[in-house]
Image: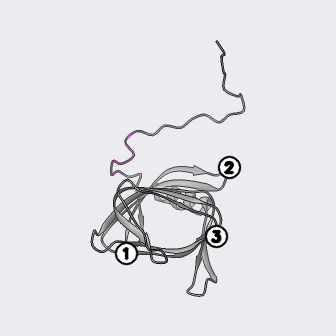
Amino acid sequence: MVVITPSPFALKEMYQPDVMVEDNKWYALGKMGMVRPLLFDVANGGWVSILKIKGQGTIQRHRHASPVTAWTLDGAWGYREHDWLATAGSFAYEPAGHIHTLYIDPKVGHMTAIFHVMGPLVYVDEHGNPVDYDDVFLRLDRYTKHC
């Protein structure tokens, strides 16, 4: 029998029960909905969070500097620049460099999804010019102020 021991250099695992409970760990995303952070990965520059939106809405057009994955738990959302619609149970992979505008499907009117953002994102205007950005440190700062 081979015994495998964890590396002494490995980080400790993390476990969070009941992440869907609506409590003070959620914070507002503008007027659209709520965000529940699950992980701020300051070592690698990314984050994992649950995005929950009720009603119609759009998240400003942006470009990711690193890949993003999304798993839809409920509702429906898509990107104005693509012809697919993410619904409950679907998974999306966004390669670095893509530009898109997230919207909530108006026929459904809500969405809940887990996003793993592996690096910063850059908000862009209609011509693709940078106008603002978001990264793990800005998110962590906002969450710290919220708490």
At 65% from the left edge and 66% from the top edge, which residue is drawn? 65
- Distance Cα–Cα, label 3 vs label 2: 21 Å
Q: Is residue 56 left or right of residue 132?
A: left
Residue that sits furthest to the front in the current view: 83
Q: Disc 3 vs disc 1: Cβ atoms closer than 8 Å?
A: no
Q: Which mark is residue 43?
A: 2
Q: Secondary structure at mark 2?
A: loop
Q: Is residue 12 left or right of residue 37?
A: right
Q: Please state which of residues 130 and 21 is positioned toward the viewer in this rendering.
A: 130
Q: Disc 3 vs disc 2: Cβ atoms closer than 8 Å?
A: no
Q: Please state which of residues 135 and 81 is positioned toward the viewer in this rendering.
A: 81
Q: Quadrant of residue 62?
A: bottom right
Q: Which of the two labelled residues, at mark 3 and mark 2, occupies the earlier sequence position?
A: 2
Report crowding for label 3: few under 14, some 14 to 19, many 20 or more residues within 10 A (C-alpha): some
At 37% from the left edge and 42% from the top edge, which residue is drawn? 18
Q: Secondary structure at mark 1?
A: loop
Kindly identify which residue carries mark 3: 97
Magenta stretch in the rendered image: 17-23
Of tags 3 and 1, the one toward the viewer is: 3
Pinpoint residue 74: horizontal percent, then vertical percent: 33, 57
Pinpoint residue 98: horizontal percent, then vertical percent: 59, 71
How many numbered discs sit on the rendered protein?
Answer: 3
- Distance Cα–Cα, label 3 vs label 1: 23 Å
Report crowding for label 1: few under 14, some 14 to 19, many 20 or more residues within 10 A (C-alpha): some
Kindly identify which residue carries mark 1: 57
